[in-house]
Image: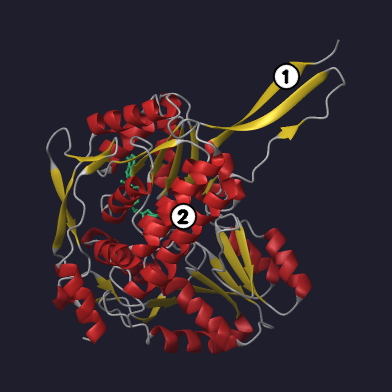
Amino acid sequence: MTTATADWTTRLAGLRPPAGLHIDGRSVAAATGRTFPCISPRDGRVVAEVAEGGAEDVDRAVASARSAFQDGRWARRSPRERRETLLRLADLIEEHREELALLESVDMGKPISDSLAVDLRVTLQTFRFYAEAIDKLYGEVAPTAEDQLATITREPVGVVGAVVPWNFPLMMAAWKLAPALAVGNSVVLKPAEQSPLTALRLAELAAEAGLPPGVLNVVPGFGPTAGAALGRHPDVDALGFTGSGEVGRAFLIYAGESNMKKVMLECGGKSPQIVLPDAPDLDRVADAIVSGIYFNQGEACSAGSRLLVHDDIKDQVLERVVERSEQWHPGDPLDPSTRIGAVVEQRHLQRVLEYVAVGQAEGASLITGGRRAREETGGFYVEPTVFDAVRPEMRIAQEEIFGPVLSVLTFRTLEEAIDIANATSYGLAAAVWTTDVSAAHRTARDLRAGTVWINCFDASDITVPFGGSGESGYGRDKSLHAVDNYTHRKTTWLHIGA
Ligand code: NAD
């Protein structure tokens, strides 16, 4: 154990995580009085007991959000005032970044160094980006006839529901909250039951920053109860969801069966990394393949879970990938040198290991990893795993495993590579490695994916939209395009003829 690990562990012992629902600016108990344990995947221990929100609590939160929206306490503030409040919130997040990073790592198992370098950094950028953007967005005047004036303005939709997953709890919440709040909406956020702590702390910081009561409510609870209640609520105007395809489908049904609320979905992927024979620098390619699948324990919707490598260079690439995989030892999330932490929960550990068994049963060749690690800690760790000889129709090439498991497939022609890459139900992200500019552009054009990386993987910036096609969903997080999710365009006609 390094000294720094001991420091984090000591701080953890002194931490009092938030435990109530956050409704109408206050921390309150669930209507039923029920709580649920937050189990840390780091060691299987309970870190907090959190109020378990249900339908009645969602009703209370939506009513609070609605009345905040109706009386204009936030929506009718000038964009500049909203900007100042959100910038204050960003400053508070920065001030508390280590506490938030610690809560995140303990709650869902990611390395503390990633929590700080990725989740907290991006969360801060996100709040600052939308805060800064909001007083710089203009409406339009349409080129109508002389005697008419038609303006096109953006209006907040009203009450926004946000249902987020456990893999980047704070960051995903920020991607939805920051644009929704910046344009004047009120929000009810339901964090995943595996990872509610940072969302609750964020709500406290938002109140401290001066966000009026009711504008941001947080209701932790389970999907089929709290999540479904939000999805079905007749007074929620728009809902942003990130998570599994199965639940994404449920939100479409909820919307259809309730008030036709606007739904934005981000439902995962099975991202291919295509390596052509003229790929530049195979060491760099191997580094990107390995971090592309093992970052965040493979629990990333854009994880590069399929390596499509040309037959001629397969051995050279695979040798490098395996050598590097064996250097990604799962470790204590609170050790700053750890690169791969614990998967989110016992059930998910079982799920990932079941996929390993499925791959073997399907005839793929397990060449490294595939087992539980660090079992003596009581935590949920999986070895970085590589399957060779995977065929496109196998389940491990089709389904989102959401763990550190790489499937390696080969091809002979670029057309074949593109066909294999596109032959899943997903369309979130993809990468191609080549020095041939035409091949790179042709591949980027032909891949079904919301994002294509050429000679890089996972490049990301708040200025760039992120989202998918196919069963990866629709709507875009990040960038100014995300504002579309949380606004309507209104046209207003004025007759100005004599
Ligand atoms: P999930 O889709 O079940 O959960 C995501 C969110 O939806 C959580 O807040 C959850 O409480 C809520 N939810 C669950 N069931 C619901 C329901 N019936 N109605 C309304 N809300 C509901 O994801 P999971 O079970 O945590 O993970 C399962 C798989 O989903 C993963 O292994 C992975 O393949 C995928 N996943 C994808 C992402 C992503 O970023 N796209 C994130 C998490 C999980």
Q: Position of residue 288 (x, y in %)?
A: 52, 78
311 in relation to 71, above or below: below
Closest to the observer, 105 or 134: 134
Q: Quadrant of residue 299?
A: bottom left
Q: State which quadrant residue 412 falls in.
A: bottom right
* 458 to the left or right of 377: right
Q: Are marks 2 and 1 in contact (CB under 8 Å)?
A: no
Which residue does the numbered mark 2 point to in the structure image?
268
Q: Amino acid at mark 1?
A: Trp
Report the side of 3 relative to 267 (left or right): left
The answer, for residue 402, to whether it is visible in the render is no
> Image quadrant for the N terminus?
bottom left
Residue at the image position 46 percent from the left and 55 percent from the top: 268
Tag 2: residue type? Gly
- In x, y percent, where is residue 444? 69, 63
Q: Which residue is mark 1?
A: 493
Q: CA distance from mark 2 to mark 1?
A: 42 Å
Q: Is mark 2 within 8 Å of ligand 1?
A: yes
Mark 1 Cα shell of 10 Å, populated few (<14), some (14-19), many (≥20):
few
* Colour theme: secondary structure
Above or below, 285 against 188 in this view is below
Q: Residue at x 85, y 17 (%)?
A: 147
